[in-house]
Amino acid sequence: MVAHLSDVRDLEVPTIVDRTPTYLGRYEAAYRLAATRTGLHVVMACGTYREAWLTEEIVGFDEAALADGYCQGLDAAGFVKLGCDPDGPGDGETRCVRAAGRASRVTGALVACHVGHAGPAWRTVDAFEAGGGDPARFVVVHLQNESDFPRPPRPCPPRCVARIRRDRGRPTV
């Protein structure tokens, strides 16, 4: 792995971002070792995943405890990563998204959430705002299953949209 990451660094890629949430196989020691051996900046996430992957401990936390956990996780992580079911968010996922909004308000952290469709995306944005989060600090990931892109369910505020295009093979915003 180190040889591969060194090749990536040699291509002038300075940073690797791993978006694996806290309870889903995140290996902090491996990230630190990779950064030390390659000179790459390695950014990891903290957070929770989809409804079926929420542990009993997480399900038992109220929103304040979840937000505190995200804030503590941000001591080592660079952002909060959440996951929601394609037809979600479910009750547990909604609590996690609201808690992430609260944690983001306190820390200024970016929060990313993968969903699959535009409907759940808007529901997660709404939950994030209900928790006190600024939607400009919220990234919706994975709308690959959406079949109706020409007509979004509601207009996107300009400050909440980043359009990424490729110029000369490199992404630009």
Image (cartoon, helix red, strand yellow):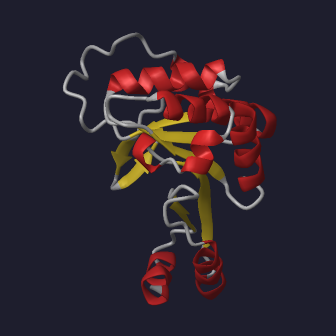
**In the image, residue 172 lies at what x, y percent?**
45, 45
- Can you see residue 80? no
Give the answer, above or below, for where 4 lies relative to 137. Answer: below
Q: Residue furthest top?
A: 154
Q: For the point 42% across and 27% down, which residue is it? A: 121
The front one of 119 and 2 is 119
- Identify which residue is drawn at 55% across, 58% down: 23
Q: What x and y, as percent, mark residue 147?
A: 19, 26
Q: How many marks?
A: 0
The percent coordinates of residue 99 (x first, y second) are: 66, 33
Relative to 155, say whether 97 is above or below.
below
- Asked if residue 163 lies left or right of residue 56, the reply is left
Q: Quadrant of the N terminus?
A: bottom left
Say which of 62 and 3 sits in front. 62
Asked whether residue 164 appears in the rendered view, the answer is yes
Point 25% across, 29% down: residue:
146
Residue 124 or residue 93, whichever sits in front? 93
Q: Is residue 24 left or right of residue 68?
A: left
Residue 66 in percent (x, y) is at 69, 40
Q: Is residue 6 above or below residue 132?
A: below
Report the front residue among 159 and 72.
72
Q: Is residue 45 left or right of residue 103?
A: left
142 relative to 55 in the view: left or right: left
* Residue occupying the point 49% across, 60% down: 24
Q: Residue lying furthest left in this view?
A: 147
